[in-house]
């Protein structure tokens, strides 16, 4: 177009030139070459924080030649990573020694989360946590706060200042935890409702009703959580499921009339779209099927599942063609051992290998971007470079350490197969150093 | 002493002041507090590349007050890490996608190792490889070269220039590999013999007779390897064993009269002291017992075992009190995904967790230092700060990333229990960045 209108609009545009990779479909169900979109020399045009145009530089340059353009040579630009399960109050207790899930909660997690009654403390940790996310290329996350409403306030305030799309919620927990961390069914309902009214859909923020897990919630509290989902049909639900065999056994004791772990949540109306279950290591075939029917999602957290000795997630079963479940990657810090989604993909690959499965780099990076956006029902605005979506993206450096520079030639990969090798090395060897820049709504917010 | 003699000697001394951790015994068999030696404010006095004195600064300062001293505040000084299994020609193909052991060898390893016929190429990679080891705090390694004698020459020349204690050998491989990589039983015998005569015990270098594994060596070649061990009783033997279930099955087909995989090597005289077997993931109880009796060692390579989907090494069985086997950690680059022994310890912990075992940070760092030295029969000269040993040591920074700095207070841990938490975070979160300095024979050879 060359109307005066579009001419004047161009003064508000900026652009990024470089190599781009995103996904337009799910490589678990279509051929990888049909799912991945690789533009070796591309142009991403931005307007008011959104994607205005995207494609080959050669095709777009004529139209946008006067737009101020930042060029990244020998880099790979991708949509921001999406972390579908993480606990911000556990930032400081990452890598706590020696226990599996239930003992680890008692010994390390609960005492740490107790500190988040102090809002000033929560504010400080929220800043460190968001710095960590952004320096690792994670632009959106589904986040556990602590049981205290002020811990949610602190988190949302910090995320709002940075214009981040974040989903979070106050932990609901009314039993099997220290008194200083317990709410009640009624108080958790009321506090959650207040927080939803204050924060849900405020700018880019979203609320998740967050019962910790079936062990620490009475049936009454789970029912209250279900009521909240009915009252506010577009909020999220975020909890844990079937992470550890002892946990699964305890849930069966606590809910003897339920058919299984997922059924505990199902009976409370917590298995539907926008419901995200972390782990699912020990889910049964019937439970995968039910999650598929319900449109619920699983957060696959490999570094955590290995660190806590929880077990090996069955990615190929979750992503089966017969009853596909939405899956994203989760770091699960502090059960996970790294904020890096690249390192998380490294261990996802290893979990798959131990199960004689191959998790290709395209599949892994799909889970980290568009797959995560779909798991969080955010694919309308996030996950790839479709025109109109929010411009949250990252610039990756495949030669960010001496060893990676030795392994990976400077040349831009010309083919999808050469790119596959490059991005596999990024996910196996890359860490926060591989993230050169992070952009939020088209603005550079982090640079290494 | 205050004789004129000792006064004049002091002009040749240097010293390091800081917090020191080493091991004086094996924490798998004695209490951890009896195995670990922690000196929060210590002095290490060096003379001619060896340790002259070591202890509390308060006790030693009077005697060595005029010795030029480098002080490291808020750091942890440890003996250099020992990598008991690694392939230098595979440096460039680290993180190769998608295969398990046997297919991975065919598709990636063999073509890469073919390049090492060119000595100039081998020299270039040897330099990169040694840079990687030193920047990761690894000061000694047991190293596979390629089948070509010149690949060993290139490696030893590079190691000699840096005064490193390295053990390496030419691969022996006379079947089930591409022609361009195969030697013969006779040529491998002769070439190995020549290399032993040229390099074994030249300065700090040692030779390892290196049949790749039973699949790629005829019985004739294994017998020749056994002959070499008889002719040169103080050389090493370095090979692979029981890494992958398909490999184990193939060995049984190839050697139908042997009782098992280890027995193949045993019948050739390759199971004794100074014999190091990489992996051993699928060893039987009887095989562990035989390794114990023979004084042989296992290199535990967790990042590789996970990356290639080989399985979970049974560390508690190898380190049982009934028939203890010497064990060290191996990165196994390029089957392993990192040169970092810290990252290797991270995944060793995860492998143990998946098996419901706890690998404490003291146990892991024992394996990385004194345990590795014992596995390589180098404990007379390496592995801890005993007086008279070679002064190969490293300076670790427990606050080397923003996240580690947030998790770990600057204060020096006052107790062994506080130290345990600190070093656990180092092994779970640390990488090459945690290695601030590497000293070889008392000289600073690498600084971050």
Image (spheres, coloured by chain):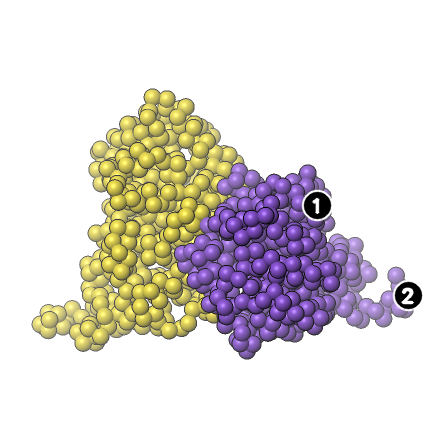
Chain colours: A yellow, B purple
User: Residue B272 got which mark?
Assistant: none
Q: Position of residue B371 (x, y in %)?
A: 66, 51
Q: Is residue B442 above or below residue A343?
A: below
Question: Relative to the observer, which residue lies in front, B82 or B444?
Answer: B82
Quadrant occupied by the N terminus of chain A:
bottom left
Q: Is residue B107 above or below residue B246?
A: below
Q: CA distance from mark 2 to mark 1?
A: 49 Å
Q: Answer yes or no: are tags 2 and 1 on the same subunit.
A: yes
Whichever of labels 2 and 1 marks the residue nearer the N terminus, that label is: 2
Residue at left offset 46%, top offset 31%: A246
Q: Position of residue B264 (x, y in %)?
A: 61, 51
Residue at left offset 73%, top offset 67%: B201
Quadrant occupied by the C terminus of chain A:
bottom left
Helix, strand or loop at label 2? It is loop
Residue at left offset 48%, top offset 66%: B178
Q: Residues within 10 Å of mark 2 (few under 14, many from 20)?
A: few
Residue at left offset 37%, top offset 24%: A255
Q: Position of residue B426 (x, y in %)?
A: 56, 52
Instruction: Report which residue position mark 2 lands on.
Output: B3
Instruction: Report which residue position mark 1 lands on.
Output: B293
Helix, strand or loop at label 1? It is helix
Question: Relative to the observer, which residue lies in front, A241 or B129?
Answer: B129
Q: Quadrant of residue A81?
A: bottom left
């Amino acid at each position: 177009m060359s109307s005066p209108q579009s001419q004047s609009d161009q003064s508000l545009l900026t652009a990024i030139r470089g190599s781009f990779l995103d996904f337009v479909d799910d490589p678990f169900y279509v051929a990888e070459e049909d799912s991945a979109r690789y533009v070796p020399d591309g142009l991403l045009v931005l307007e008011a924080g959104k994607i205005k145009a995207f494609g080959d530089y050669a095709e777009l340059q004529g139209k946008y030649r006067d737009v101020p353009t930042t060029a990244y040579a020998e880099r790979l630009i991708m949509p921001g990573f999406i972390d579908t399960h993480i606990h911000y109050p556990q930032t400081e207790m990452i890598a706590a020694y020696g226990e599996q899930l239930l003992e680890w909660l008692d010994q390390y997690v609960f005492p740490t989360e107790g500190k988040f009654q102090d809002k000033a403390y929560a504010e400080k940790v929220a800043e460190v946590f968001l710095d960590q996310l952004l320096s690792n290329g994670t632009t959106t996350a589904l986040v556990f706060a602590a049981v205290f409403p002020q811990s949610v306030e602190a988190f949302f305030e910090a995320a709002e200042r940075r214009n981040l799309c974040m989903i979070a919620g106050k932990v609901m927990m009314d039993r099997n935890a220290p008194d200083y961390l317990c709410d009640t069914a009624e108080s958790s309902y009321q506090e959650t409702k207040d927080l939803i009214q204050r924060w849900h859909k405020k700018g880019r923020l979203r609320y998740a009703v967050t019962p910790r897990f079936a062990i620490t919630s009475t049936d009454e509290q789970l029912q209250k959580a279900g009521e909240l989902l009915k009252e506010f049909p577009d909020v999220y639900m975020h909890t844990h499921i079937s992470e550890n065999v002892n946990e699964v056994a305890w849930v069966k004791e606590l809910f003897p009339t339920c058919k299984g772990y997922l059924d505990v949540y199902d009976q409370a109306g917590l298995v539907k779209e926008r419901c995200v279950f972390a782990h699912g290591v020990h889910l049964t075939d019937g439970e995968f099927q039910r999650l598929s029917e319900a449109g619920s999602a699983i957060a696959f957290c490999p570094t955590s599942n290995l660190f806590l000795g929880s077990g090996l997630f069955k990615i190929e079963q979750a992503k089966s063609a017969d009853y596909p479940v939405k899956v994203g990657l989760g770091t699960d810090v502090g059960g996970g051992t790294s904020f890096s989604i690249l390192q998380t993909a490294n261990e996802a690959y290893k979990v798959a290998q131990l199960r004689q499965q191959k998790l290709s780099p395209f599949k892994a990076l799909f889970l980290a971007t568009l797959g995560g956006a779909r798991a969080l029902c955010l694919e309308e605005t996030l996950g790839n470079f479709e025109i109109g979506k929010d411009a949250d993206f990252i610039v990756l450096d495949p030669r960010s350490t001496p060893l990676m520079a030795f392994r990976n030639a400077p040349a831009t990969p010309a083919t999808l197969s050469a790119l596959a090798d490059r991005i596999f090395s990024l996910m196996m060897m890359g860490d926060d150093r591989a993230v050169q820049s992070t952009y939020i709504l088209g603005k550079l917010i982090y640079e290494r």
